[in-house]
Image (cartoon, rainbow, N blue to C red):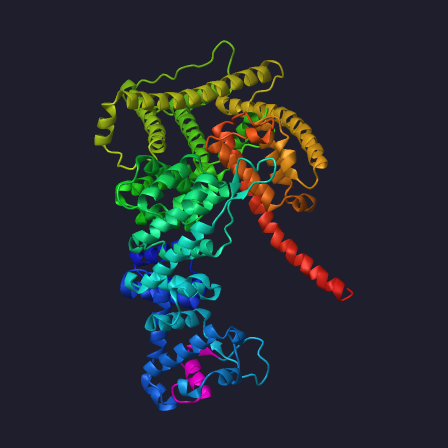
Amino acid sequence: MANAFLSQAQEREVLHHLATSKSTLANTPLFLTLLCRYVKGAKTAPKNDYELLSLQIDGLAHRDPAYLRRIYGLDPAELLKGAQRIARLFAEESSLGLAPTIDQVETVLNKAEVPGGDIQRFVAAMVDAKIARADVANAALGDRRFAFAHRRYQEALFVRHLVAHPGYLSGYDLLTEPRWREYAVTLLQTQPDEALIEMFEAAVQILVEATDRQYRRDALIPLSDCCGYFEWTSESTQMLNLLQEGLARRVSIIPEMLSTHVEKFLKVRWETGDSFDRMMVVRVATLLPQATLSKYLEETFLVGSDKAQSEGFNHTTALVGEIPSAVKQAVLDRLADEILGAKDASALLRMEALVARLPRDLGAGYVYRRCVLLRKLTNLVSFTGLPTRLEAAIGVVTTLFTAQENKSHTATQDTKFALLLLNSITLYVFALLFMVVPSNHSSNEMLRALQEMSVVSPTKLYTPIHSSNGIINTFFDLLLLVVPLLITIFPIVLFRFRTLGEPLNVGFFIRRMRRRISIFETAKMFAWMLLIMGILGATAYVFGIIVSFAANHALGLLISAPTMVVGIVAMALSIWGLLLIFALLSFRRKREMRRWFDMQFGKFPDNPLIALLSSQTWKQFQAGLSYLNESVHHEATLRRVVDDQIRSISAALQHIQRGGYLRESKLALADIRPNALDLVDCINLVEDIRDSVHARQPLEGEISDVVGQHEASGV
């Protein structure tokens, strides 16, 4: 990028494109250079890879027309026409692969179809133009193999052929044949809606038939009478994923008829399926009508799983028109948490690009700027890792009497703890200055003040500092009082209104002053923050007094450190000692719970579902899921956990979330309603278990195949 000599705005455009695009072209220096050149010339990023690749291929063909005519007797148009024919051959004849020999091509391709009538000479022209290459890896001597300079060149040329010959492949084939998938996605991303009518009509026909055929699989016994789930491996569901990928940024061209039939197909899955069904519905939600999209997103942000909310957040750019207030606030809340939790510059760029695509009346730009400023304010404290450690310590205490770990960790909580530490440090530093450096004190006065802060006498806790210049002292005292308050209040206000979709100006605060409830909420927030900092400071100071007094009078030690520092260290050591005791007690309780689950899993070695359903309370059930999630990586447990069992538990939890009961199952949990937050935590755990199982099972299958081959060969 530095070598491209881009302006600052053009660099941001390139970075936005790289952060938001799913393309792998940026992994190649050549295509990254092409992207920079494109942005420099067009002042904007390409809409898709096809636009960039097509421009590059045209440039290669027209690079030196005179040389091409003199050496090979071809003009650029003939070269492109022949390259399209070769690309079509590669797409049609899968047996050739992507690097065939010239002899193989000559057996299946008529020479008359190639400009010049000589395949070998034409391939040499493609290689000379850098559209193809002859240095194929692993080619044997004399093979005369060739390939396109990049696989994506072949895709772009074949798509160009499809555009020029609309009837070459039917809309049904493009949507259902796996080998045409990438070409179909490119067509959906690049072609006008008039050219996509056949594909849209084929999609509607597929959905009509699939809606009539789809059925819900019953959950396993004893849950089969009340809930079930759907499969997502059919032709129609794969087609929806294809349409979603191709039309994600072209919502305006989706026909109403297609949206209506997508809604009919997905509605039954949303209303009667499990949490995985809901997540998959949200994944293709861009294809739904706007009213249904808003409704599903609102419900997802309210009670959906973490994965479903993440999918829904990515689709908020598809919202058009007036956005419901609940969806608007949920999007801004999620945006703030994503920005505060961004791990690197790339994640921040993705959020910046997303904000640019969201509707302006959403106010996402204000949220982005505030959260970026909050990150800068808390970076110094967050870098030390203290906020995370403090939160983890508090988490140990809060989960003392529960068997499961606390999973509700968010970046917003980290920022809250970081602000608390930052404000505490700020107030302490200015308090130190307030006691030591007001006005122009002499050195002995400053030393005496430091001594008063370091070692507290039982008869004299503090000796005021006297000075002859009272006016200057008063000014500096007020300055040292006002500055820390402003420095403390500013980040608090920023954090309090981080998800506000409007500017924090005087008018905003005047409007809030007119609402008594808003005044009460703001005052309560400041009161709690000051109360917490005051309690922490007072507690630390008392600890410092006690330790300093005990060390001086009982042990004869003079601690030459500020009382507050001594108190903070003493309080930290005391807290960590208590946390160690609490952790040991918690570990003992969890070990007893695990023994109980080991016994239950031992009774039902082939069905962990029954072991979980034998729980007497929902807290116990949640603890069992946590235990299963931790142990699912072990081979012995993995063999017992199958997809049907996981989906059955997921279906039961989703059934309860909709307001249903499990009375038909005759379980101990049948008539007990869990807490809403605990229910969402259980759904998240089930999805984590499913992801772990699916991540390990393909690998296990590959290992089994290799072992079988070795056994068959006598190894």
User: Is 346 rendered above or below residue 629?
Assistant: below
Q: Is residue 386 visible?
A: no
In the image shown, does 378 or 527 lie closer to the viewer? 527
Residue 499 sits in which quadrant? top left
- Residue 202, relative to residue 377: is it above or below? below
Residue 493 x, y percent position in the rendering:
33, 30
The stretch of residues the image draws in magenta is 115-133
The residue lying at 69 percent from left, 42 percent from top is 606
Locate the N terminus and report the quarter of the image it occupies: bottom left
Can you give x and y, in whole percent of width and height, for residue 374 in the image?
A: 37, 37
Viewer-side residue, 459 vs 11: 11
User: How many discs mark residues in the rendered view?
Assistant: 0
Q: Is residue 120 magenta?
A: yes
Within the image, what quadrant is residue 290 found in? top left
The quarter holding residue 54 reads bottom left
Is 584 rendered above or below residue 313? Answer: above
Could one spot residue 339 in this view of the protein?
A: yes
The reply to whether the magenta stretch includes residue 394 is no
The residue closer to the viewer here, 79 or 173, is: 173
Q: Position of residue 99 (x, y in %)?
A: 52, 76
693 left or right, relative to 172: right
Q: Quadrant of the C terminus?
A: bottom right
Tell me: 592 left or right of 258.
right
Q: Residue furthest front?
A: 212
Residue 555: x %, y % from top left: 63, 17
Q: Residue at x 39, y 26 (%)?
A: 430
Farthest top residue in view: 459
